[in-house]
Image: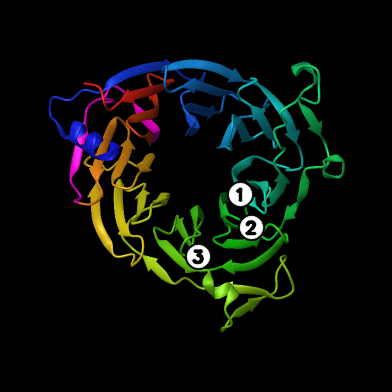
Amino acid sequence: MPDASVLQNWSSSDFRPGRTTLRGHMTSVITCLQFEDNYVITGADDKMIRVYDAINKKFLLQLSGHDGGVWALKYSHDGILVSGSADSTVRVWDIKKGYCTHVFEGHKSTVRCLDIVEYENTNYIVTGSRDNTLHVWKLPKKSSATDYENEHDYPLLFHTPEENPYFVGVLRGHTALVRAVSGHGNIVVSGSYDNTLIVWDVAQMKCLCILSGHTDRVYSALYDHERKRCISASMDTTIKIWDLNNIWNNGEWSYATNSVSPRTKILGAMYTLHGHTSMVGLLRLSDKFLVSAAADGVVNVWDANSYLLKHSFDNTNSCSITALEITDVILLSGSQSLLKMYDLRSGLCFYSDTLNDANQIWSVKLKGQTLVAAVERDGRSFLEILSLAEN
């Protein structure tokens, strides 16, 4: 098992992982990080997307085209990437060919988050924006034979929804910016600075219900499709669990009249989890564990079924947790120059000084025995690739 060997190596006092440092963006902050199909992909406020080869540990290419910072990335499959930007557009890229294939316009402000869901053999792009709306598009299918002679015929730019054959519709209901979106199949959950979450059916383009209970901004949301639950984290310092099975079961409902529909179902939380003293910004979920991290420097591990607290880890410098990653048994957290690895089963912590030369760890991802980290060092950004099988 890769996780077992990773934990064994990391816990050894004389272990030093193989390390490759690659130049990052022309800004100190890396806003988003993806690690899929051996591609490591980063976005930043310099308007660029950078693509790296995790196997050969080298920079591959830079994707340019956005006129604003890149705030959301989602890798789909076979080299297809979707990005959202402060320029209000959504772009579809073919990494293997090295250029943008489609540009979707429609949002009126920054595209802050996005997800890709598959339903009945169709992939949908769902984006959330500072304009308080969600937009839904069909992800263009990758053709085996190009429709155009060369890359200079791309990208296909659609200025209005009316001229865009991939446009599905707009989901309206939030009264403040949409900060998080998470979905599976036809169900998508969005979290907003209006303190609420909304459950949507993107196949029917309608609101199923509003999740009400947070007293401050919602920063993170996860749709647990296996258990039919939604998990949210907020600036009110709490995590809430919502049982979405109630949507399809007959029962007692509260109703509200708002911009979504004349009578919108309101669902209260199933559980409220306490354990943080400041904004909870990060959530991660596996089959057995739910992990939350907050600006108070605390990382909490909860049972994913009972939601009982299993472990609580307090950062020694009390700095905000900015990076969080989990596998079935491994937890990684990053804060300033502090990178920690935990065994989720035992709660044992293994500290490494591997990245102690960084000023800030922005994001971490772990695939097999390869760890990638987006970091800041002396006002510049870098990508670190660590081989946890090497010493």
Q: Which residue is located at x 53 percent, y 16 percent?
A: 60
Pointer 3 or 2: first along the chain: 2
Residue type at the position of mark 3 = Lys
Q: Which residue is located at x 73 percent, y 65 percent?
A: 259
Residue 24: give its label. none
Image quarter in which the C terminus is found: top left
Badge 1, how many Cα within 10 Å: few under 14, some, many 20+? many
When asked about the image quadrant of residue 71, the answer is: top right
Query: Would residue 354 be counted in the magenta stretch?
Result: yes
Residue 228: give its label. 3
Task: Please state the horizontal and vertical placement of residue 12, each as a whole percent of the image.
Answer: 14, 31
In the visual, does 385 lie left or right of 93? left
Image quarter in which the N terminus is found: top left
Residue 178 higher or lower than 309, as above or below: above
Task: Please state the horizontal and vertical placement of residue 33, each as a whole percent of the image.
Answer: 48, 33
Which element carries disc 2, helix, strand or loop? loop
Which element carries disc 1, helix, strand or loop? strand
Is 137 in front, or is 69?
A: 137
Residue 20 higher or lower than 259, as above or below: above
Residue denoted by label 2: 186
Q: Can residue 313 be seen in this view?
A: yes
Q: Which colour scheme is used?
A: rainbow
Residue type at the position of mark 1 = Val
Give the extent of the magenta segment: 346-365
Residue 64 higher or lower than 250, as above or below: above
Task: Please state the horizontal and vertical placement of residue 72, each as a whole percent of the image.
Answer: 57, 37
When asked about the image quadrant of residue 241, the answer is: bottom left
Tell me the CA gap for discs 1 and 3.
15 Å
Residue 117: give its label. 1
| Furthest residue in direction front, as rendered | 144
Pointer 2 or 1: first along the chain: 1
Tell me the CA gap for discs 3 and 2.
12 Å
